[in-house]
Each structure stands twice: as C-alpha cells, then as structure tokens.
Amino acid sequence: MILRHFTHRRFLPAIVARGGISVQDTETPYLQFEFNPTSDHLKQTFHRMQHAADIPWDETDTVVLDFDFVKMQAADIDVLEQVESFTGKIESVPSNGPVRFVKNFLSLGYLTEESREQLSEYY
C-alpha cells in the first residue's frame, strides 16, 4: 500500500535538503496524498489543479513521490482520512484514489524503493 504525493519539480531541492516533504512547501496545515491509487489519472491531471500564476506548471513538472504506507503505520505516523475545515487540492472523483493527510512533515526515509530511485535521478 502506498501514499502518493504530488509536487512540482522546482520543490525537489528543498525537499532533498530537508530530508522530507513539509507543509512549508504547500502553505497548508496538512500534506495531502492519494491513498493506494489504482490508476495514474491524478498523476496525469494534477497540474490542472494548480492555479498559482507565479509557478508555471504542466504535466512534465509533476513529480510523484510514493511513500510506503505499511512502514509509516509501523512507525506510528498518524495518517488521517479526513481533516476538519480542510478540503485540500485533490478532488474527490471516482478516477482518483481516496485522499489521506499527514500533519507537518514526512521523511524521505518512508519512500518506496522505486521513488527513491526516481529521486536519485534528479539528485
């Protein structure tokens, strides 16, 4: 089982330097994930949800970071199914997987091996 996080490639240097993903990059109180996605629909369309005029974003800018949910559970990391007063950016549509939230920070140590390899291509 995985938790899939989407980010812009321009955030990768800060993510790598910090050793994880942080709400500092999202300007929201929670990190948002697609839980155990069954397709790449969201990966292919995520860039359309980004409305920040100061960051040009097309589908080639989207980087997927897959985190090992089982490892996170073993480490007692709180993964929330819903959060009061926060809807997030991932739309609730049938082609997207369920959404999950993590507060504040998540270490790159929980990345799947495949995501680690992908990240090493950037750095």
Image (cartoon, rainbow, N blue to C red):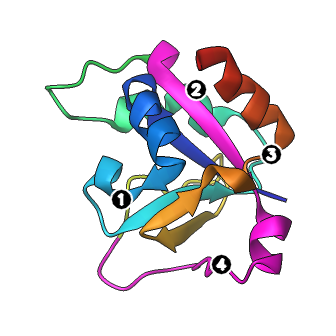
Q: Secondary structure at mark 3?
A: loop
Question: Where residue 79 sits: x, y (%)?
Answer: 62, 76
Query: Which residue is identified by label 2?
Result: 44
In terms of sequence position, does the residue under pointer 4 or pointer 1 come before the other?
1
Viewport quadrant of the C terminus: top right
The crowding category of the residue bearing disc 3, from other C-alpha atoms within 10 Å (few below 14, some 14 to 19, many at least 20), is: some
Does the image show residue 3?
no
Question: Where residue 14 sits: x, y (%)?
Answer: 40, 37
Residue type at mark 3? Thr
Query: Vertical placement of 49 versus 30: above or below?
Result: above
Query: Which residue is identified by label 3?
Result: 112
Query: Which residue is identified by label 1?
Result: 23
Residue type at mark 2? Gln
Does the image show residue 83?
yes
Q: CA distance from mark 4 to mark 1?
A: 16 Å
Q: Residue at x 49, y 59 (%)?
A: 32
The crowding category of the residue bearing disc 4, from other C-alpha atoms within 10 Å (few below 14, some 14 to 19, many at least 20), is: few
For the magenta stretch, what is the residue range?
Answer: 59-86
Q: Secondary structure at mark 4?
A: loop
Q: Residue at x 25, y 55 (%)?
A: 27
The crowding category of the residue bearing disc 1, from other C-alpha atoms within 10 Å (few below 14, some 14 to 19, many at least 20), is: some
In terms of sequence position, does the residue under pointer 4 or pointer 3 come before the other?
4
